Every structure is written in structure tokens, then in C-alpha cells.
Image (cartoon, helix red, strand yellow):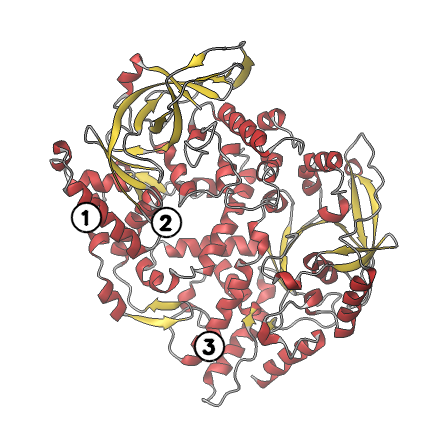
Amino acid sequence: MKALLRLWKQRQEDAGVVDEFTSGEYVHSSALAPPSSRVEDERLAEESDLQRTLPSYSPLPASGHFIRLLDIQPGPRGTFLQCNLRVASLSSQPSYKALSYAWVDETVNASSRKDLPIICDQNVILVSRNLHAALEVFRPIKSILTLWVDFLCINQQDTEERTQQVGIMRDIYLNCEEVLIWLGPNVGGDFLGVNDETADSAVVTWHNDSRDEDMMCWYTNCFNEYESHGEHTMPLLWARDIFGAFAVLRRLAEGSSLDHCRFYRSSITSSKQLSWSSLVQKGIWAIVDASWWQRTWVIQETVLPRKATVYLGLMSALWAMFASAAATYVQQLATADLKGLSQGLDNGGDPLLLLAKSVLDLEFVRASRTEGTQLPMLSMLRRFRVKRSSDPRDKVFALLGLASEQVQQSMKPDYSLTVLQVMRMTTIAVLVESRGLDPLAGRVLGPTASPSWVTNWHEFPAGNERERLDCLRLYNASGGDQSGIMIRLHGPFLQLQGCVVSKIGRVGVRAPDGGFERLRNFVGKWQDMLSHSLVLPVREKSFESFWKTITADTLYVESSRRPSTSLLAQESRYLRTSSCPNVDVSAAAQAWKSDDTATRHRKTTFGPAGLLKAYVPPEELTALINGFHYAVNTASGGRRFFVTQNGLMGIGPARLDQGDEVHIVLGSRVPLILRRRRFPRGCAQDAQFGGSEGVQSSIGACNKLHYKTYALVGDAYVHGVMDGEFSSGLKESQKIYIH
């Protein structure tokens, strides 16, 4: 143990940060540069009195796929960074690696984000601290490293060049040897384990194979030695165990259960185990909290290259290790005690689960490419709507490199367009590609905007929207084939065909977006509203219909019980209850509703995330409760329960209100909630798109005043109309104008 502490202190002293580890401050150059170098860099930045200066760019050749590459000159660690830009053609297959990083590290205080200088083509320029730290870590001691770095290799001040380079971003990442995923630098107090001091790099590397076993054995022995010593053992001096966090991922990647991982989350038996495990969890949070995960551009940057490696300062691992660990952890959660876990995780969340979701979202796109499946643009937009971009238009442009040829031909990156123009163009493009009305489901601009049917992909989705919308494939409210529907566009209007089911009579309170107990309490309020409903037909209905309504008539099915083992098929996590003949929905609901909190509290112990379970209910019962809870959370989280004037029960968007109308619309798998507009509106342009070929064509001007128009509120589940029960009414359907 003393040798371990000496090693940690030595690495901190080498970085010049041994006295500041408790503050969690930013360590310049990823804990590599000595103090004198850091001071010199910051002094030069101040004395230069520079803004964020860019290199002197010469225009790229007009024809051909030309890019700039950055050659990082070798040098001792801590010395001034020097580099050169050169022009290369992708057709000549140049050798380079691509850097994927966040321009701004939002985990660092704004006061600590001062730009730092590098020398590029003999000019002193300023780059962000996050980029500077990455370049310092990747710079070799003996050889030149060639990188493609968007901030330096694209003239960010030239809109035309920026548009052109974004248009070939797909080719840039497809042709790179490897993408270096930079999560961010280390901070003082990070425990980084051991490394080969004779290597050309100080980075500790996890290979995701047998080469990792020596490191795992060394780390496990360190933990065992610490735990076995008496009460007077020296305290752990580091603030975050980064090495331990990667060790946890390595164990998961090989398929091991965390129940057998004593240095993290297994049943806590001593205060020492708790102390160690808490620092490992802080290390996992360091990975999860990295700004990189929030960027929209990282999607194609991770998916397209042949090889990807993740770096958190001096710690690195293959992306494949992250992917395997994420898949294992999600599978293990299927039979975990959700309620026992949630008691301690509701406030901060489970960092491993958050990491697993982020990784598997990216891995799903990678797997689809491997299996030769082209993901629809709509699917990718929904999957990654939670990502961020400084320019709202990039929420769309960043995905075009992964889109179908049809979408790429209809849309090009164009930074001269407004945000609303880009979003409207995107909505039309996905309507054409989907050949149906699926794009109208989910969070749209809504009644307060015009046109209400456009989706602003820069806005975050509501609740568990993505998983909920993945279940649309299970329904067919309008009956028949959903593809090949012709849609007419009248300027701001969409002309559709449909019929009214009923108006909304009563509306319940909005449910929370998660939390076992909170969700169960709100469902109880809905049930009370239903019990006191003045609508006689509803009172006479079985409460089984209520349970099916709040779950959208679905159940979550753990991966081992799904029909296929491919990653793409595993995304089908929910099945209609009719496809689960061995599950009694009412029994599942009662088990979920009556799960005893007090009993669970008496059978739990403290762990690094709060309360951890020491008691596990029978596996089948746990899976049943979990399956029902997941279904309720997905279908009803963040939404509202309602009863129509003719006694139908449903779940709809949070902004629905009494008097809104439920419509069955030709081409829509689910009912749509529409709200009458007060005033007539006219239109001039006219176009038609859709059909079996997904074509778009102009058919002249409309020049009419439309009196009966609607705003789109959102989509809904309405029990009893989801399988074409009202399709006969579509034979006498009327035109619906939505704007």
C-alpha cells in the first residue's frame, strides 16, 4: 500500500499538482507539463494580448476533396507545442488520425478556460485549454504525428469553406486511420495507476484483451492490501480513481458481474470498501460528465472510422471495451432490483447506466453499418436529439453524413439558411423518406408556433420520448399499409385526410419523467380521477384497460427473451401484451403497485451511490415488476392521462387540454391530438410529396383561404383505437389542414 501511495505522489509531483488535488482544479496539459511550462504558456498568452487567433489560411483548391492536415512536431513533455498545416487530397489516401473533442470543456469553471498558445506555421495562435491538453498528450517525443483537427484545419471564418468541408466530413472520418476520442484532461488528485516509463507516451492503455490482466491483478492486490490492514492504514489521498473506473469497465467488458467486483458496488462489508468504492464511482462520473458525450458531431466521428480509442487524460481504452461493458451492464440491469437501486440513485442517477446509454446509442449506429442496414434519418434525429451543438443547424447537418442517399440529395449543409428554414426542410425530408406520418409524432413546435408540425431538433425531447416513439411500429390506428401516402403542402399547411374520434373531456396531471415512487404516486392520482369520472361507460370498464392505457399496451422484455440476438433486433425492447401470453397484465400491475417500500428499506445497506440492495426478490417477480415499470415510464413519463367525451382512455402530450380533438389520420400509426385554430389563413405555394417512391413535386398555387384549420398538439395512445378499429371512418374522411 505504501508503494502505491509513493507511486501516486510521484506522478502528482511530476505534474506539479501534488498540493492542489483536493481542489479539483484543471491541470494544464493533462498533468504532464511541469509548473514552469504552464506559467510560461499563460504568460505568453497574456503578453501577446491576442484574441483567439487563427492561422493564415490560403484557399483550398476548388475541385476535389482537399483538406488541411496538422503535423504535430515532436518534443519533450512540457515544452512549447509546435505544428504545421499542409493541404492534402483525400483521393491520395493520406495517412492521418482524426481528433474528436469538445471545443469547450464545460466541466471546467469559466475562469479556468483561458486559451493557451501554440506555434502554428511560425505564428503564435491561441487554442482552447481542452484542445491544448489533447495535443500535449498526443504529441510524441520522437516522431511527427499527423492529425485532422476541425478547429485548426477548417477556416472557421469562411462560411463557404465551412459549408464545403462539412459536406465532406463523412469522407474525412471514413479515411482516417483512427479517431482519438478526447474526453478531457485529468485534474489534480486523479489516480492513474501505473505506466511504462520507457514508452514514448505516458498514457496508460487498456487493450481489452489478455494484456490487461497484469494491470487488473496489480490493482486488485492493491485493494486487498488496503482492506486487510488495520484501522490505522494511511488514508486514500487521491480524489478520483480513474484507473479503477476503467478497471470496472474492463470487468464488465469480459462479462463479469459487478456483484463479484469488490472494489465497486458489491455488497459493502466495511468502511474501507466503501471509501475505495466511492472514489471509483467518482472516476466513473469523471467519464460520464465529460462534455464530449453531449456533442452532436461525435456521432459520425465515432461511427465512421475503422478504429476508435477513448482518452481521459493519461488513461485510454479501445472503444470496443466501452461498447462491451455497456452491453453487459444493461443486460444485468434487466433483473436488478430497480427499486432498491433507485432509493440511492434518484438524486444523482447511476453513472454506469448513463454511460451505458450514451455508448450504446453510438454503438447502435455502428452496428447498423456493420450489418448493412441504413438507418432512417428520422431514427437518428430522435436518437440523438439530446445531444448539443453551439449552432442549432448542426443538430441536422452533423447527421447528414450517415443519412441515406435520398436525404443527402434533398439536403445539403448550408449555413446561409435560418434555423427555421433548416428545420422545416428537415421535417419535409423525413416525411418524404418515411413515406408516412411518423415524423409528426413526438415533440413538435406545437400550437404556439406556425407551422406547428415542424420539429425543432435543437430542442430537447420530452421525457422518454425516443423509446416511446420506437414503439410506434407496434400500432396501426389508421389501418392498412402506412407507406405510400401522398401529402399535400400548402405553404405553411399540411393537407391530410382523417376523421374525428372524439373531443377530450377530462385531463389528469402531468406525470414525472422518472422515479419509481413518484411515478407510482401520479398513476394513483390518475386512477382516482378515473374512479370519480362522470362518464358512465368508463366506470363500467375493467381497470385492466387502465393498466393497458398507461403502458400503451406494452411490456418491456429483457434481452434474453427477445426473439433475435443481433444488436439491431435487440433495440425492440417492448412488445404488445398480446405477444406476451404468459404475462398477466393485471397481476404485473398489482405487483408493481403494491411493492413494499418499508420492507426494501429494512433490507438494504449503504454503498457508494447511497442505498444498495442486500436482498433480491425472486428473479421472475423482479423481472415482472421491472417490465411493467419500464413500460409505464416509457409510455406515460412526462405525459398526461385523459378521458374523451365518448369514454375512451388515453395518454397524450403534456400540453393537451380539454376540448382538443382526437383524430385518426390516414398514414399515421397513432392518433393525433389537434387543436382548432381561431382564424382562417390563406396560402400561395402548393406541392405534393410522398407516394410509393417518396417523390416530391410542385402542382401549382392554391391561392385559397382555409377556414377550418388546426394546430398539431402531438401524438397519443388511445385504448381501443390503436389497431384500425376506426379505419372504417376513414372512408368518409375529410381534409385536415394543419399549420
Q: Which residue is mark 1?
A: 587
Q: Is residue 595 left or right of residue 56?
A: left
Q: Which residue is mark 3?
A: 275
Q: On residue 65, which mark appears?
A: none
Q: Which residue is mark 2?
A: 513
Above or below — where is 450 with respect to 137?
above
> Label 3: few (<14), some or many (≥20) within 10 Å?
some
Whether residue 521 is visible, yes or no, is yes
Cβ–Cβ under 8 Å for marks 1 and 2: no
Q: Position of residue 679 (x, y in %)?
A: 40, 21
Which mark lies nearer to you, 3 or 2?
A: 2
Dot placed on the residue nearer the N-terminal end, 1 or 2: 2
Q: Quadrant of residue 33?
A: bottom right
What type is the residue that disc 3 sits on? Answer: Ser
In 3D space, how far apart are the residues under numbered discs 1 and 2 (Cα atoms)?
24 Å
What type is the residue that disc 2 sits on? Answer: Asp
Nearer-the-camera pick, 444 or 210: 444
Q: Which quadrant of the figure contains the N terminus?
A: bottom right
Q: Which quadrant of the figure contains the C terminus?
A: top left
In 3D space, how far apart are the residues under numbered discs 1 and 3 (Cα atoms)?
41 Å
Nearer-the-camera pick, 196 or 274: 274
What type is the residue that disc 1 sits on? Answer: Ala
> Label 2: few (<14), some or many (≥20) within 10 Å?
some
**Residue plotted at (53% across, 17% down):** 695
Dot placed on the residue nearer the N-terminal end, 1 or 3: 3
Q: Is residue 434 left or right of residue 506?
A: right
Q: Quadrant of residue 318?
A: bottom right
Q: Is residue 506 left or right of residue 275?
A: left
**Residue plotted at (33% across, 42% down):** 639
